Image (cartoon, rainbow, N blue to C red):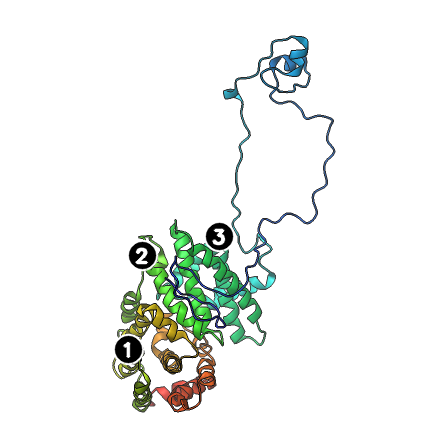
Amino acid sequence: MLECVPSANQSPVSDSSGPPRLQNDLALTSTGVGRQPLVPAAKRDRKGHRKSRQGCFSCKKRKIKCQETYPMCDNCKRLGLKCQYMQTSAVVQPATTQIELKPSLNNTPEFSLMDFQLFHHYLVAAYPHFPVASEDIWLNYITPISHQSSFLMHALLGLSASHLSKLSPTSYTSAAQSHRLKASQGLNLALSAPLKTIEEADAVVAACNALLMQSWYMDDGLHAFLVLTRSSHLVADEVRRQNIQALLAKSDLDTFVEVMSMRLNGRKAPAFDKAFIEDAVGSLEEVSGLCSEEYQGGFRECLLSNFCALENTSIEAYQAHANVCKFIVSIASKNFISLCDPTNTVCQILNAHLVALHLVMRPISCQERKKYTVTMYRIRMSNWIEEIVKGVDGGFERYLEWPRKVGELHARGELDGYILRRG
C-alpha cells in the first residue's frame, strides 16, 4: 500500500488495502476537455433530399433517387423491375477514425496565460533533479511527455508555482494549490489501473517526485514531504517489480549514493563545526528517554548516525542520509502513520530533528543537482520547525531548543556560519 497525501490539512493516511493510490481531500474538478460548444453552429440550408450514393442499378440508369431498401427498392417494386445492387464487398464504407484528445498546454481551456509563465519558470529554474543525475531526463524527455499527461503537467506547474512564490513578491499559492489538486487526482486515477507503457510509468514516477519537491516550498509541507518521500520510492519500486523500463525508476537509494560518491570524490569536503555536531548529538541524546516505541528509537538512531557522520567524509554523511530515507520508506505502515501524526509529541520532536538535519546537509546534498543555486535550499522547509514547536504541548520545549535554533538561523540565512568551521 502506498500512502501519499499531498495536503498537510488531511488526516493521517489510512492503512486500508488496495492498489497504490495517492490520498487527497480536495474536490474533483473538470478538465474541460471535450465539452460541447456553448453556441451550436448554424444549420446549413440543404436541398430537399439526400443524394443516393449506393442505389440500385435500375434507379441509377433512370437517374432517379433510390430508396436503397433491401432486397428491392420501392421504385423497382412499383414498376416490376429487377432490383440489383452493387456487391456489398465492393461498397467502400467511409472510414471511421477515433481521435484520442491528448491534453497539452495549448489545446485545452484547462491552462491559462499564467500557466505559460509558470512553465517558463519551471524550464529555467524549478525543474526537478530527482532521481539524482536526472536533470537531462527531465528537460529532454519528461517535459515533452507532460504535454500528453494532464496530471504530470499539473504537477510540474504546481512545483513551479510554489517555487516562484518563495522568490517573488507576487503570491502564486492559489495556482500552486489548484495544480497540486489536479495532479493528485490524476495521479490517483493513473495508479488505480495497471501501467501499460514506459511513458505511463515515467509519468507517475515523475509526478510523485514533482509533488515531493513542491512540498519543500510549502509552509505546511512537512506531512506531504514525509508521505511523498515514502511513496515516490515505493512507486518506483513497483515499476521496477513489473519490469517496466521507465527511465526515472531505474535508480534506487543505493544508486543515489553511488552517483553522489562519484560527484563528491576528490572535492573538498565541507568542514562541519565540532561544537555544532556536539549540540546536535546532545539534543538527540536527550530525546532518547522519550522514545518508548521501537520504531521511535530506530528513527532516532538513524538521525544520530547521520549527524555523527558529518565529522567524517561527505560520502559517509550522504550514505547515512540515505539510510534515514530508507528508514522512512521501509517502516511498517502503522508506525509510519504515527510518525506523521501531528498529535504524537515524540514523533514531532523527532521530525523537528529530521528537518534540521535536511537543512544542515545542504553543503553536501546540494551536489545532487548539477546546476545548484543557493536559493533552492534557502527557501526550502521554511517555518516547518516553527510550526512543530507551536503544535507541541508545554513541558517539551527543551527537547526542541536545538532544532528551533537551526530553523531560526535558516530563516535568517545565517545557518552556514553556525554549522561550518571557520578558517
In the picture, the quarter occupied by the N terminus is bottom left
Badge 3 vs badge 1, beta-carbon distance below 8 Å: no
Q: Secondary structure at mark 3?
A: loop
Q: Amino acid at mark 2?
A: Arg
- Describe residue 25's horizontal placement relative to residue 253 as left or right: right
Q: Report the residue marked by disc 1.
A: 294
In the picture, the quarter occupied by the C terminus is bottom left
In front here: 325 or 408? 325
Q: Residues within 10 Å of mark 3 (few under 14, many from 20)?
A: some
Q: Report the residue marked by disc 2.
A: 240
Give the numbered dot on residue 148: 3
Q: Amino acid at mark 1?
A: Glu
In front here: 396 or 132? 396
Please report whichever mark, 1 or 2, sits nearer to the chain's N-terminal start: 2
Q: Residue 38: where, in percent of width, then height? A: 68, 49
In front here: 414 or 151? 151
Image position of 17 with respect to 278: above or below: above
Residue at image position (41%, 65%) is 209
Please report whichever mark, 2 or 3, sits nearer to the chain's N-terminal start: 3
Q: Quadrant of residue 285?
A: bottom left
Q: Amino acid at mark 3?
A: Gln
